[in-house]
Image (cartoon, rainbow, N blue to C red):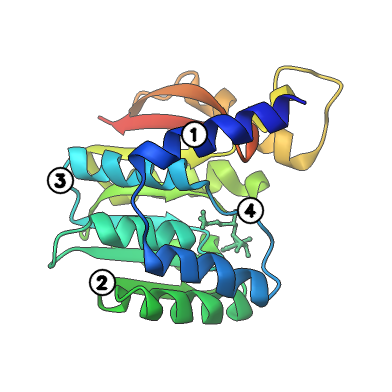
Amino acid sequence: TDQQIWTREDKYHNSFLLKHDDGIEKAVANSAKNGLAEIAVSAAQGKFLALLTQSIKAKRILEVGTLGGYSAIWFARALPDDGELVTLELVESNAKVARENLEAAGVSSKVKILVGAAVDTLKTLPTEEKFDFVFIDADKPSNLKYFIEAKRLVRSGGIIIVDNIGREGKVGDASHQEPKVQGVRDLLAALKDDPDVEATSIATVGEKGYDGFLYSIRK
Ligand code: SAM
């Protein structure tokens, strides 16, 4: 099947480009042990996101949607010693697993997990304390709300990335009305005439299926 091919291709590329990381391996195992859904970014995507943050020398990163802290470990690894990741999670039991995973990976000191509904938590973050990079990866119907807050919190020239905008090719097919698909459409509709950002969608295939990132730069 297509999925088998994409998984094989990821595996092949990763065997050359990704180093073994004990913290990452432990996070995957501990997340599975605690019954967390396998909806973290893939390893290749985690490294891609980490490289993007390094290419703008990001020191402050904001993440919406922590789960077990898998992407958080990638971000934290990419940060300088005085860098900080603030990551937002609704479910306390997920945050607990994330704390364990971040601790085991040796990056807890760089990461602050804020538990609660992200729309509320975002509103408590002060506009003056800008982030260089924002990664939005939580409940998909709220994409636009998170994007609006992200625009307020990211510096000029900073990056906002929204995950899962490909949705197996359902976004352009009007027969699909699922809230997760609609969440992507709402975001795209708002971006059409948004003077604050330049954005593009990049589809991806790999071990996590056919999906994609929306990449945008804050003007
Ligand atoms: N970024 C993570 C990674 O790649 O390792 C994966 C995040 S997972 C796709 C989405 C997470 O968002 C889940 O842990 C879920 O509990 C959380 N979430 C769902 N609704 C939320 C909300 N309203 N506020 C904050 N987090 C929420």
Residue type, numbered disc 3: Lys
Residue type, numbered disc 2: Lys
Outermost residue to the right = 175
User: Which of the four quarters of the rendered structure image does ligand 1 lie in?
Assistant: bottom right
| Residue at left offset 12%, top offset 67% | 82
| N-term mark: 2 or 1 | 1
| N-term mark: 1 or 3 | 1
For mark 3, does the 10 Å Cα neighbourhood hold few (<14), some (14 to 19), or many (20 or more) residues?
some
Element assignment for label 3: loop
The x and y percentages for residue 155 are 22, 44
Report the residue marked by disc 1: 12
Image disc number at residue 110: 2
Mark 4 vs mark 1: in front: 1
Could you tell me how far apart the alpha carbons at marks 4 and 1 are, in whole angstroms?
A: 21 Å
Q: Quadrant of residue 16?
A: top left
Depth check: give the residue in front, 207 or 187.
Answer: 207
Q: Quadrant of residue 156?
A: top left
| Residue at left offset 61%, top offset 39% | 207
Report the residue marked by disc 3: 57
Residue type, numbered disc 4: Ile
| N-term mark: 2 or 4 | 4
| Residue at left offset 24%, top offset 65% | 84
Report the residue marked by disc 4: 39
Contact, mark 2 vs mark 1 (Cβ under 8 Å): no
